[in-house]
Amino acid sequence: MQVVVQTEPPRGMVSTVRKGFLRRASVAAEASIFFFGLAMTAKAQDKSAMAPAQSRGVGIEQRLNNQVPLDLKFRDENGQTVTLGSYFGREPVILSLVYYGCRMMCTLTEYGLVNALRDVQFNIGDQYQVVTVSFNPKDNPDVAMAQKTTYTGLYGRPGAKQGWHFLVGDEPSIHALAQAVGFQYKYMPDIDLFNHPTGIMVLTPKGKVSSYFYGVQYRAQDIHAALVDASNEKIANPEDMERRLAKGIAGGGASPAGVCPSTTSKSTAPLANHPPAHTAAGAEGRQ
């Protein structure tokens, strides 16, 4: 099942309740994946010959320092036509590619992202932007708005609604963006699902790919460090990205398709041209 939350707990209970909820949501989503897999096993048996074809070309291919096309047009959660470049120029951007009807890995990806961002000192909308794009051209702004309500509510800091954007688009724009960042997915019409990798990308203010995080769980320290680097237009070392992926595979937390946890970083440096942000508790207490 897909867990959708449209309300948040009392402010005084935010930290304890939300963390507990997110853990339960993650467990519930993982359980749904497990039982979905059992249900699909019988169907997959007689289509085993198709499995390699369905998985071929699915994964995340590193395209560090690649420029994303900022002139691509999408529609935001309000139904307004926007260009991708409207979210760039001053701050780094965290990009997540999901599809809003996904009841499995996309849900885990977004919950993992919001869970990590709640522990990042910087504030969405102040020191960085988050752009979530659906790669399903059938998704519409109403669904995008429902997603925004859920995840900005869970994040719970002022300014999130101005800094976290949920976009939909047509196939050419989606494909061009996915290709630019190396996100390779495939639609499976026989079961009406997408075969896709999981992960997020951090982009520089100029729109270049700075770093990758694989899988559905991300460490706040790593995201903090990646935002600092991206704000200074720094690009991650390809070997470090390969080690991040390999470490996850060796530890059982990733597959060769590009699903793995990120490594740990202790950096606490501020973003370029931005003062340090309030902590989560401080931000929630602002008027």
Image (cartoon, helix red, strand yellow):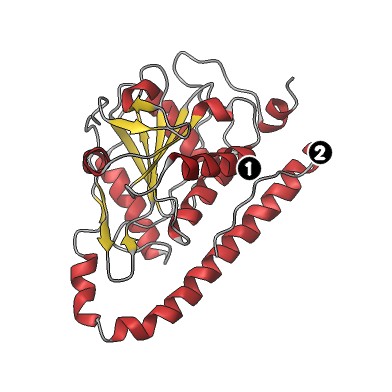
Q: Secondary structure at mark 2?
A: helix
Which circle, 2 or 1, is nearer the viewer?
1
For this orientation, the residue located farthest to the top is: 273
Please indicate whether residue 17 sits to the left or right of residue 218 in the image. right
Gap in Å between the C-alphas at discs 2 and 1? Answer: 14 Å
Residue at image location 72% in from the left, 43% down from the top: 15
What x and y, as percent, mark residue 124?
54, 28
Residue 237, compared with residue 83, is above or below; it is below
Please indicate whether residue 286 sits to the left or right of residue 65 in the image. right
Question: Tag count in the figure?
Answer: 2
Residue 247, compared with residue 39, is above or below; it is above
For the residues bearing labels 2 and 1, Cβ distance under 8 angstroms: no
What x and y, as percent, mark residue 174?
27, 41
| Label number found at residue 12 | 2
Residue 265 in sight from this viewpoint: no
- Depth order, front residue of 209/54: 54
Q: Residues within 10 Å of mark 1 (few under 14, many from 20)?
A: many
Residue at image location 28% in from the left, 38% down from the top: 237
Residue 244 in sight from this viewpoint: yes
Residue 169 occupies quadrant: top left
Residue 187 occupies quadrant: bottom left
**Given the image, on which type of amino acid does mark 1 rest?**
Leu
Residue at image location 32% in from the left, 33% down from the top: 210
**Given the image, on which type of amino acid does mark 2 rest?**
Gly
- Depth order, front residue of 124/65: 124
- Depth order, front residue of 212/104: 104
Residue on which the image places disc 1:
154
Q: Which is nearer the N-term, disc 2 or disc 1? A: 2
| Label number found at residue 173 | none
Q: Secondary structure at mark 1?
A: helix
What x and y, as percent, mark residue 26?
57, 59
- Depth order, front residue of 3/264: 3
